[in-house]
Image: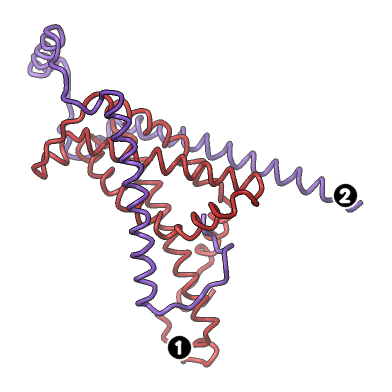
Chain colours: A red, B purple
Amino acid sequence: MNAGPATPAADSPVTVSRRRILARTRLDFWLDALLLVAFTLAYSLGFTGIATHEWLGIGLGVVLLVHLTLHWDWVIRTTRKLLRRGGRERFVWLVNVLLLLSMTLCIASGILISEVALPELGITPAAGSFWRQMHDTTATLTLILVPIHATLDWRWIVGVARRFAAWRPGRSR
Amino acid sequence: MDRGRGPPFRRLASGAVTVKFLRQLAAVVLVVAVIVGIGMLWAHTSGGAGPRRAPSPEALQRLEQIKEQIKTGVIRVHSDNGFHLADTGNLIRTCEIETVLAVGVIAVSVVRRRRHRTRRTAARA
């Protein structure tokens, strides 16, 4: 909280929208970091154990929906301009679409083969070997795509991290 | 992703922001539902969605052997109540794979940028 005296410049529309953009940047940064950590933990089944793995996967699905919703404008914009855009933008779009497909199928198949989480809720899924195979394949594909997806915008990550490191409470940046 | 390179930021009322978020969330849920639906269809056409086959007598025998080994302590199982700190090797391996891929992408990006700069400088000269 900024307890200092309010100046006319501090309440100007430019400052307000700047603050909103910064709040959104902060939300994006921490949500992305949370997704990366959660996926890394969820993939390490030997470390987490089956129960934590399953609950993490379900939580990951919910956060993924929020992540996609927050970037939905980008999805629409890039898909519309796909034919006009250059090679890099197309590559980023392709990686993102593949990641969406693999992660969605990974989480869905994980729910369908759940051994602890769903039975705890009183639901007994009866999925066969197809979904087990699907879960293994999509999890491996997701493991390859997640770091690529995260580091395609590494300059943005470094920039935001630097700003956070230099941030002092009460100072508008 | 959306890193502020899009259209200029517009000031929207908080109600409008909520409506926009909900509309986009509905679109995302629809897309996810379509993907899961395609997966279900795929499972159905490949015969994977049907009931499980009964296990073979050999598999049942092996299962009994494993149960016996767990009882006698030959095979140790985790209680599954949380993180198994003894298995950090598993987590480290995941981190290693992610780091190698991330470093690869960053290296390619740096090399591409350098080449682009060199070309631009050469074109100016």
For residue A55, side relative to residue B13 (left or right): left
Q: Tag 1's secondary structure?
A: loop
Amino acid type, mark 2: Ala
Residue B69, quarter of picture: top left
Residues flagged by tags 1 and 2 on a common chain: no
Is A137 situated above or below B5?
above
Which mark, by number, is residue A4?
1
Q: Residues within 10 Å of mark 1 (few under 14, many from 20)?
A: few
The percent coordinates of residue A4 (x first, y second) are: 45, 88
Residue A72, quarter of picture: bottom left
For residue B113, side relative to residue A68 (left or right): right
Is A46 situated above or below B70?
below
Query: In front: B57, or A50?
Result: B57
Amino acid type, mark 1: Gly
Label 2 resides on the chain identified as B
Name the residue tied to disc 2: B123
